[in-house]
Image (spheres, rainbow, N blue to C red):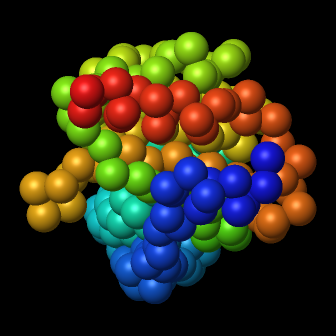
Amino acid sequence: MELRDFSKRGWTRVKLESRASVALFPIAWGLLPIAFGWLMWFTGTNVDWVPYLGVAGMLLIMMGGLAGLSSRMGSLGATRVGIGLFCVTFSIVAWALVSQGSFPTVGGLVFSSAAVIALVKGLDVVFKDGGYVFERPWNPKVRLPVDSLLGWEIKTTRFNQQSMAVKRFGSNQFVTIYGRMVNNDAYLCFDVLGCIDKNEFESLKFTIDLDGFDEAMNDAEE
């Protein structure tokens, strides 16, 4: 399927706002406590403070990760993203155990460092994405034309601002259909995540009949 097929059938490409700077700012600040934690552990200075620095650092990193993911619906469905967030969450739990003396300090530092790497790799899926998101006006009362979606996982046929249908091409590449409201106007969105360029987009087998969406809207108007 070519990009122009969408524009011919009333779909408009959405211009996405980059969230990289919003994500990297708290992540950068979160790295400072982790770095100080390593330094304090190596020198043996105020080691009792390391767990508190670890928790503070990982909370900032978690905040940055969620901020970076907030611009894309369904981004949590990417395997790398899920692993990254899980590692960050586990690191916070690890620091709680360190503060109770149930886990070694160096273990918390190692887990935190690994979690940062995992989260950055997860965010890389979103930030390197080509931003192939399309939308079209939609009547919220119209059901999703499931007959036009072959091989898709249908979540719901009702208009929903969460995921309505998903089709996966890989663990970190999938397309999601969802609804959204803009100034009381309803739109249906077609969001491809994990697709880098035009050639890759046109090589994906969406198995979607765009004409079926027009027919669904026309039937509702009649």
Front-most of 88 and 149? 149
Corner quadrant of residue 161: top left
In the rendered image, the quadrant that contains the C terminus is top left
User: Can residue 60 be seen?
Assistant: yes
Q: Residue furthest left?
A: 184
Corner quadrant of residue 140: top left
Q: Is residue 3 above or below residue 210?
A: below
x and y percent of residue 168 in the render? 69, 30
x and y percent of residue 15 in the render? 48, 75
Residue placed at 37% from the left, 59% from the top?
A: 70
Q: Residue furthest front?
A: 222
x and y percent of residue 117 in the render? 66, 61
Q: How many badges with numbers are in the image?
A: 0
Horizontally, is 134 left or right of 175 in the view? left
Q: Is residue 77 above or below residue 20?
A: above
x and y percent of residue 170 in the render? 78, 34
Residue placed at 71% from the left, 43% from the top?
A: 173
Front-most of 21 and 110? 21
Horizontally, is 50 left or right of 139 in the view? right
Front-most of 81 and 71? 71
Corner quadrant of residue 2: bottom right
Horizontally, is 28 left or right of 199 in the view? left
Residue placed at 51% from the left, 56% from the top?
A: 11
Q: Is residue 208 above or below residue 44?
A: above
User: Can residue 108 be seen?
Assistant: no
